[in-house]
Image (spheres, rainbow, N blue to C red):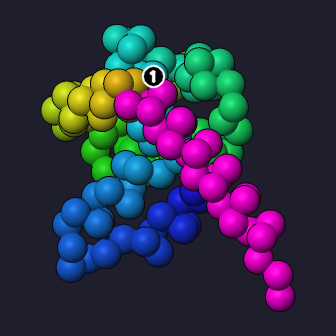
Amino acid sequence: MYRDNIKEEVFPDCPIRNILARISAKWSLLVLFTLYNNSCRMRFNALQREIPDISQRMLTNTLRTLEEDGLVERIIYPEVPPHVEYSLTERALSLLPCINTLVDWAKHNMVAILKDRASYLRLNQNTNTNIQI
């Protein structure tokens, strides 16, 4: 999800929607989890190597959004060439138990969910092929 689209989905009257629209964006949780798993500050290119499917633009947008929400800290070192590192903030660290619970739930239920999806598709393919207009 592009950063501009995230802004459009912010719901000022509903704190749950407001926060979830930002952290549930396609790459946000993965970036947070990657920073956590590496337990240190990471440079942009190192993050991109750890998340090979993410484009440079999407990683930049995601990091900016997470920084804007106070979940990621961007540290700029005055060197040539510029040296920038990203790390989790205390707020992000307080969110991680929730993320870990979600990841554990997903691991525990993944096989059953994939089985249900396949059953659903088989059932609907058979239903759709029998319908004539």
What residue do we see at 21% from left, 73% from top?
14
Observer able to see residue 59: yes
User: Does the rendering let one see residue 77?
Assistant: no
The residue under the point 43% across, 71% down is 9
At horizontal 50% and vertical 43% (from top left) the residue drawn is 116
Question: Is the residue 102 above or below the residue 17 in the image?
Answer: above
**Magenta span has 122?**
yes
The residue that label 1 is drawn on is: 34
Secondary structure, mark 1, is helix
Image point 73% across, 58% down: which residue? 125
Question: In the rendered view, does 35 fall on the left or right side of 55?
Answer: left
Q: In which quarter of the image is the N terminus?
A: bottom right
Most extreme residue toward the bottom is 133
In front of the other: 23 or 127: 127
| Quarter of the rendering occupied by the C terminus | bottom right
Q: Is the magenta stretch mostly helix, strand or loop?
A: helix
Between 14 and 83, the one lying in front of the other is 14
Q: Answer with the quarter of the image where residue 91 lies.
A: top left
Q: Vertical placement of 23 versus 105: above or below?
A: below
Q: Where is residue 55 in the image (x, y as percent from the top left)?
A: 70, 38
Label 1 CA crowd tier, 10 Å (few <14, some 14–19, many 20+): some
Which residue is at the front of the view, 127 or 46? 127
Q: What stretch is highlighted in magenta?
A: 109-133
- List x then y, in percent, for residue 67: 38, 44
- Residue 125's place in the image compared with 36, above or below, is below
User: Where is residue 112 drawn, in percent x and y?
Assistant: 44, 33
**Where residue 118 sits: x, y (%)?**
61, 42
Comparing 83 with 41, the one in front is 41
Q: Could you tell whether 131 is left or right of 6 in the image?
A: right
Tell me the amino acid under the disc marked 1.
Answer: Thr
